[in-house]
Image: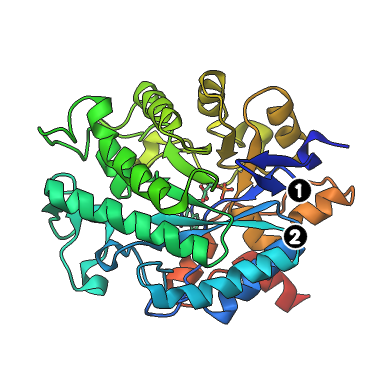
């Protein structure tokens, strides 16, 4: 049996294989952030497709932290009931499911939220509307909201939570010297820049207890002038491990990375795949907790080698599952052809247009066939 189909555990969460569906905003939640039947059905489809661990889209923990339209929220107790349907769908078909909890900081959309965006520093130029610099009390309040969000996740039956520390959202902004210009205990050294994330982790742990999986997704670097470096990312990951996280998913970049980040489109050769593999290996060599690699993985053979050769413990994908929710089942059945995802990012456009995420190429193919 391939190492990819070995059963494993993350802090008591039993996983049937090493495949993870990376957090993916689907644009399918209700306007108030509630889980919808479409989202539940999409979850069921991924679970029927044998994905070991499903990570949901980012769910905002406070209203002003909403990044985009039709995004899931976990900011009110009334949302728990809908989320329970989602976890039920995953469990019914043998998958585990983790809720990604998030706050988008200056990437929030004030037109949508009706409130000014919050950020570590009121740096102009990163967002259309200048954000408001957070006070120490704001930071405590947001940390508390993450704790409440995690409690709701646990009540809704999620097997764990993932803290979104990547891609230039609020906690990634705190980690990044490009966005975080603070001169208090939340800015400056990497220990200080990690303090907000550690405060969040503290609140989350108190809410859910020590036997509940708490994962993070972190940037290996920001790929921006003056942004988070690989060394600082490693230091932050070590601090988070020390403070009790259970696994780390390694990603990278922000909306402002431009051409500095490895190309994420047209991933048509093995060399272009798994573009954060070396960064993941660096973390894996220093951390004791499992490392999850995301970004451009498309080939079974490469995924297997990356795990065997100690680059990562788990293989995470987002776009391939939009086209082929049954990819893991297909691979498990012995059909090891690479994922058919063309990495053209048209799926994102469909969700932005309010249609909910789908593979545009696949739909055209089905219509013409
Ligand atoms: C439509 C879309 C929505 C995404 N939403 C999220 C999200 O909510 N949270 C997150 O951490 N990453 C999000 N991502 C990033 C993916 O999780 C993943 O890191 C990235 O797409 C690279 O992996 P892939 O090459 O397998 O798609 C999103 C990506 C796409 C294409």
Q: Is residue 60 above or below residue 264?
A: below
Helix, strand or loop at label 1? It is loop
Mark earlier in primary sequence (2, 1): 1
The residue lying toward the viewer, choosing from 189 and 111, is 189
The residue lying toward the viewer, choosing from 51 and 145, is 145
Q: Quadrant of the C terminus?
A: bottom right
Tell me where residue 320 sits by quadrant.
bottom right
Number of callouts in the render? 2
Q: Is 323 displayed left or right of 117 in the figure? A: right
Q: Which residue is mark 2?
A: 94
Q: Which residue is mark 1?
A: 16
- The x, y position of residue 216, in whole percent, is 46, 42
Q: Quadrant of the N terminus?
A: top right
Helix, strand or loop at label 2? It is loop
The residue lying toward the viewer, choosing from 241 and 39, is 241
Instruction: Identify the residue at image location x=80%, y=42%.
Output: 5
């Amino acid at each position: 049996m391939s190492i990819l189909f070995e059963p494993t555990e993350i802090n008591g969460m039993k996983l049937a294989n090493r495949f993870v569906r990376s957090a993916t905003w689907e644009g399918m939640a209700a306007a108030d952030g509630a889980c919808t039947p479409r989202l539940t059905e999409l979850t069921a489809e991924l679970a029927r497709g044998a994905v070991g661990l499903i990570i949901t889209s980012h769910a905002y923990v406070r209203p002003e932290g909403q990044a985009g339209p039709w995004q899931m929220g976990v900011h009110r107790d009334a949302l728990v009931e809908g989320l329970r349907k989602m976890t039920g769908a995953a469990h019914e078909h043998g998958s585990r499911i983790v809720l990604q909890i998030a706050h988008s900081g200056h990437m929030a959309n004030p037109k949508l939220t009706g409130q000014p965006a919050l950020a570590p520093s009121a740096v102009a130029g990163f967002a259309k509307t200048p954000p408001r610099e957070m006070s120490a009390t704001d930071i405590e309040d947001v940390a508390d909201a993450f704790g409440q969000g995690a409690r709701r996740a646990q009540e809704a039956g999620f097997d764990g939570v993932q803290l979104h520390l990547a891609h230039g959202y609020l906690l990634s902004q705190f980690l990044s010297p490009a966005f975080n210009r603070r001169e208090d205990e939340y800015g400056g050294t990497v220990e200080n820049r990690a303090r907000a994330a550690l405060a969040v982790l503290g609140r989350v742990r108190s809410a859910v207890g020590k036997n509940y999986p708490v994962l993070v997704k972190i940037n290996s670097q920001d790929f921006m002038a003056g942004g988070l470096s690989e060394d600082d990312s490693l230091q932050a990951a070590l601090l988070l491990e020390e403070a009790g996280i259970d696994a780390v998913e390694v990603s990278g970049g922000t909306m402002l990375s431009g051409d500095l980040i490895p190309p994420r489109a047209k991933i048509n050769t093995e060399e272009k795949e798994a573009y954060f593999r070396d960064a993941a290996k660096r973390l894996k060599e220093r951390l004791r907790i499992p490392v999850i690699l995301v970004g451009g993985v498309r080939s079974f053979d490469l995924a297997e080698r990356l795990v065997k050769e100690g680059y990562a413990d788990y293989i995470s994908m987002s776009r391939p599952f939009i086209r082929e929710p049954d990819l893991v089942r297909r691979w498990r059945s012995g059909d090891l052809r690479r994922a058919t995802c063309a990495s053209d990012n048209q799926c994102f456009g469909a969700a932005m247009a309010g249609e909910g995420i789908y593979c545009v190429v696949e739909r055209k193919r089905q219509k013409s066939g």
